[in-house]
Amino acid sequence: MLLRYLAALSEAERLSIPAIGAEHFCDNEVNANACAHLVATGIKRASCGLLKSYQIEGEDLPVAGKLTVVLDWRQWPVCIVRTTDVQIAPFDRVPEEFAYLEGEGDRTYEEWRRAHIQFFEREAERLGDTFNFDSAVVLERFEKVFP
């Protein structure tokens, strides 16, 4: 999938890509597959993660222009997205419109907060850390580019 997409780009476009990765969303099969479907259908156009997670696991932060092959839980490619914007904010200051762009649940801010508090508490515990409403969150917006 990635090679087909890259082959369709000009050399200048290929050279301008700052990073390429592959990953699935979420920490369980049901949600990972649901999110991959939401991205593939153009509904999910954003995602977020704890800044501490990137730091502790030694992962690079996403950057505008990065290509990501979205995988399902089995690690099969579903589609490709390009990061359009990255910001860092305290959890309690994530804007309501971001919840809508994430495309999950009923797309309300209340549902987004509830689900992400649960997720970030699990993630922080896994990392040996704690989560609170001041925890820094990496907010990534993206657009589906292939297929």
Image (cartoon, rainbow, N blue to C red):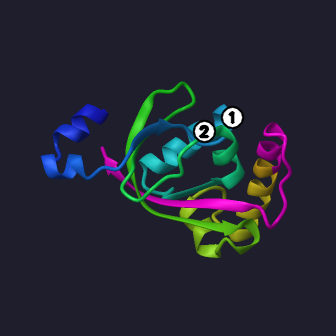
In the rendered view, does 74 fall on the left or right side of 52? left
Which residue ends up furthest to the top in the rendered image? 74
Pointer 2 with pointer 1, Cβ within 8 A: yes
Q: How many marks?
A: 2
Residue situated in front as seen by the camera: 106 or 120: 120
User: Does residue 121 show up?
Assistant: yes
Q: Residue at x 73, y 66 (%)?
A: 91
Amino acid, disc 1: Asn
Q: Which residue is mark 2?
A: 32
Residue extent of the magenta highlight: 121-147
Mark 2 Cα within 10 Å, few/some/many (few <14, many 20+)?
many
* Disc 2 element: helix
**Residue 60 appears left or right of 55:** left
User: Residue 111's mark?
Assistant: none
Q: Secondary structure at mark 1?
A: loop
When the figure is inspected, residue 49 is found, relative to residue 33, above or below; the finding is: below
**Quarter holding residue 80:** top left
The residue at which mark 1 appears reads as 28
Q: Label 2 amino acid?
A: Ala
Image x and y of residue 30, in percent? 65, 36
